[in-house]
Amino acid sequence: MLNNWVDQLNNTRAAAAPFGEANPKMLTAFRGLNAAQGSNGALDAKTRELIAIAVAVTTRCDGCIASHASAARQAGATEAEVSDALGTAIALNAGAAYVYSLRAMEAFGQMGK
C-alpha cells in the first residue's frame, strides 16, 4: 500500500481547522469556490469528480486525490471509470512533457543565435 488514503483525507480535513483560524477569509473563499463549482449543472457530479481526480494526479496533490477519490466513489464512479480518467491524466502529462520539451529545444536554439 502506498498510502492510507482514508487517513490522508481525515488528516487533511483536520489540518484545515488551524488554517481556518489563522486565515478565515481565505478558507471561506476556498469553500465558496468549491461550492460554486458545478453550479451551472452542465456536468453531473460523477463526471466532475472523474475530472477532478485526474487533475489531482496531474497536480500531484495527495489531499486532492483523497478528497476526490472519496467524492467519486460517493457519486457512483466505478473503478473502470476512475482508471479511464487516470489514463487520460497520464496521457496528458506525457503530452505536456513533449510540448514543453519542444519549447525547451526552441529556447536552447535561440540562445545560440
Image: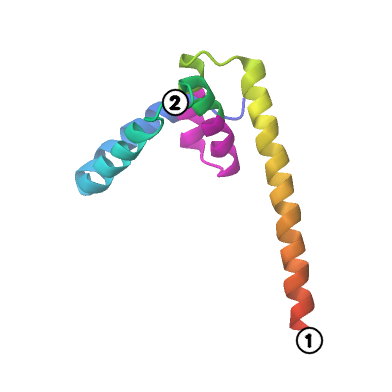
Q: Looking at the picture, which amino acid does disc 1 mark?
A: Lys
Residue drawn at x 27%, y 47% is: 26
Query: Which of the pair 48/41 is nearer the observer?
Result: 41
Query: Which of the pair 39/72 is nearer the observer?
Result: 39
- Drawn side of residue 39 relative to residue 46, left or right: left
Q: Secondary structure at mark 1?
A: loop
Residue drawn at x 38%, y 27% is: 10
Q: CA distance from mark 2 to mark 1?
A: 54 Å
Q: Quadrant of the N terminus?
A: top right
**Which sits earlier in the primary sequence, circle 2 or circle 1?**
2
Tell me, yes or no, whether the two marked residues, 2 and 1, touch with CB atoms within 8 Å: no
Query: Which of the pair 67/32 is nearer the observer?
Result: 32
The nearer-to-camera label among 2 and 1 is: 1
* Badge 2: residue crowd in 10 Å (few <14, some 14–19, many ≥20): few
Q: Which residue is mark 1?
A: 113
Residue 4 seen anywhere in this rendered image of the structure: no
Residue drawn at x 69%, y 42% is: 92
Residue 57 pos. (x, y %): 59, 38
- Drawn side of residue 73 relative to residue 36, left or right: right
Q: Secondary structure at mark 2?
A: helix
Q: 107 above or below 99?
A: below
Residue 87 seen anywhere in this rendered image of the structure: yes
Q: 76 above or below 8?
A: above
Residue 95 pos. (x, y %): 73, 47
Which region of the structure is painted magenta?
Answer: 51-70
Q: Which residue is mark 2?
A: 7
